[in-house]
Image (tube, rainbow, N blue to C red):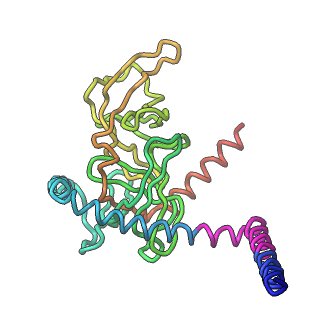
Amino acid sequence: MRLLANLISKIGVFIFFLILEAVSIFFMFSNSSYHKSVIGKSFMDMNGYFSEKVSYVTQFFDLPEENIRLASENAKLRQDLKNTTIINRNDSTLSGMDSIYNQKFIYKPAQIIDYSLRKKDNYFLINKGKADGIKEDMAVVFGKGIVGAVLSTSDHYASVISILHSKTNIKAKVKNLNYFGIIKWDGEDHRKLSLTEIPKYLSIKVGDTVVTAGASAIYPEGEMIGKVTKLVPNNQTGDFNIEVTTFEDLANVKNVYVIENLDRANILEAQEKQQELIDDTE
């Protein structure tokens, strides 16, 4: 009996030691931004690894539909290339130059391996990261729309802030019109967006295509967003209340492109100087 009591006493001391170790590690990571960053990237890697394995299984059953989607997307890309000056092309990247803003872009293929759609603030996880040249604030698109922009990266994965996010504001316009507004999401239907700040004197109709407006450090001009499905004049603001429906349900999107804007530094510098001038005049 005494032997059992001694054993329990020793085990109790060991368990108490483990508890103290766990508490000290918790406070170390809680109070250190460096350790928070490390554990955040580690969690992204771990989540990305298991999500990628699950994604491989689900994609196997989606192959027939996905092949049709890819064939359609490739056809669109070939058509777009006719109106684009090609700088370089290989199996993994596609570079081009926007004819209006003289911006150079590199398109890098990736796959969505995890996502959320029905929260107020939604995110995607893709299977490319820093080792693949992916950086923060790169646009993520697919053949029929935009997904969002890279928020953070680990070596082999990247978290993408979705277009379905309360803080997403993207410059957009109705195709073939030079007046741009802002695309937002109201947090309800994941296929419905709102285009704001568009004056009602413009010639816009239901069925018109909405695209990115360009002149951006993130998104090139002309990336599709959706189509106008409801158009209501707002007599108080003098603008339209425009409902935009995405061309594709983002739940069905697997293959995407991450866009590197090679002119990003110059654009940000110009925007900073412009803001300084605005601040000086106020």
Instruction: Write the residue at 33% across / 34% down.
Output: 245
Q: Position of residue 233 (x, y in %)?
A: 41, 16
User: Along the line of sight, which residue is nearer the eye, 251 or 244?
Assistant: 251
- Relative height, residue 53 to residue 252 (above, below): below
Q: Residue furthest top?
A: 235
Q: Quadrant of the N terminus?
A: bottom right
Residue 258, located in which quarter of the rendered image? Answer: bottom left
- Relative height, residue 38 to residue 125 (above, below): below
Instruction: Write the residue at 31% across / 52% down.
Output: 253
Q: Quadrant of the C terminus?
A: top right
Q: Is residue 71 magenta?
A: no
User: Along the line of sight, which residue is nearer the eye, 7 or 87?
Assistant: 7
Q: Is residue 34 magenta?
A: yes
Q: Position of residue 74 (x, y in %)?
A: 18, 58
Instruction: Write the residue at 78% across / 69% down.
Output: 23
Q: Is residue 264 left or right of residue 230?
A: right
Magenta stretch: dominant secondary structure: helix
Residue interval drawn in magenta: 19-40
Q: Position of residue 194 (x, y in %)?
A: 43, 31
Instruction: Write the residue at 45% across / 37% down.
Output: 183
